[in-house]
Amino acid sequence: MKQEAADPYGMIMDAIVTQALPPSQKVSENILSETFGISRAMARNMMERLAAQHFLVTLSPRITQVAPLTLLEIRQNFMLRRMLLPEIIAGASKVDFDKITALNKKISSLLPFKDDETALELLKVNKELNLTLCEPIGYPLMIDWVRQLEDTAMRIYWLYIKTKEAFPYSSDQQSTIIDVMRTDDRKRIHACINDMIVQTEERVLDAVFQNKQFYTQDLIV
């Protein structure tokens, strides 16, 4: 009997984000079990969970694949984040400024990144910072939506990282958001978050359009 990995979900998501499991690649219980050293029962559980979150898609009872990553998915992700994040973050109370400041310092320490491992860690810390900004809103279902959007954003940012060898925004920009949040001015916070998302979308889409390797349905680096 296989000894289960400590975090099989995290390992599989890392592989999806970094395209070790590229968009539209076929997956199965056997493939996940062999690749990640987990039991078939655990692999089945992970497939069900990832399918429910739309990171895997089931085409037929016998065919499941990694969810595609296209311009449509990118635009939808940014649109939903523009709709949700400014409202959630502006409406949050009792923000843990010590934690978000520490996370932002960690982001700064990881820049510029030198390898894929550091780049992935950077994405994870950035996700944690964004979730920390949202969690005080106090609605678990809404936080689940944000977490799923942030996981997809990691897939999107990975495209930018691999093509531009840079992160789509700086820790200084995050510092600006933190400073604005300290004012407790909901209108300014909303505008600041929205502007940052819009600017990041423009950078990412420019990176996609400037690379011929992305002139396919799936954006694979």
Image (spheres, grey):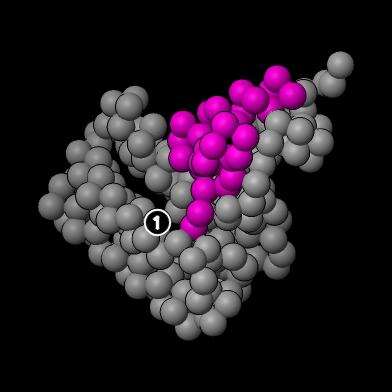
Residue 166 lies left or right of residue 176; in this view the side is right
Q: Which residue appears at 83% of the width and 21% of the height?
A: 3
The residue carrying mark 1 is 73
Let me know if residue 47 is in the magenta part: yes
Q: Which residue appears at 75% of the width and 38% of the height?
A: 31
Looking at the picture, tell me which residue is in the foreground, 58 or 55: 58
Q: Is residue 166 above or below residue 31?
A: below
Q: Is residue 167 above or below residue 95?
A: below
Q: Which residue appears at 58% of the width and 53% of the height?
A: 24
- Residue kind at label 1, given as amino acid type: Glu
Residue 112 lies left or right of residue 128; in this view the side is right
Q: Horizontal and vertical percent for residue 19?
A: 64, 56
Let me know if residue 124 is in the magenta part: no
Q: Horizontal and vertical percent for residue 114?
A: 70, 67
Q: Secondary structure at mark 1?
A: helix
Q: Is residue 89 above or below residue 203?
A: above
Residue 99 lies left or right of residue 164; in this view the side is left
Q: Is residue 145 visible?
A: yes
The image quarter containing residue 95 is top left
Q: Is residue 100 visible?
A: no
What's drawn in magenta, residue-wise?
A: 40-69
The outermost residue toward the top is: 1
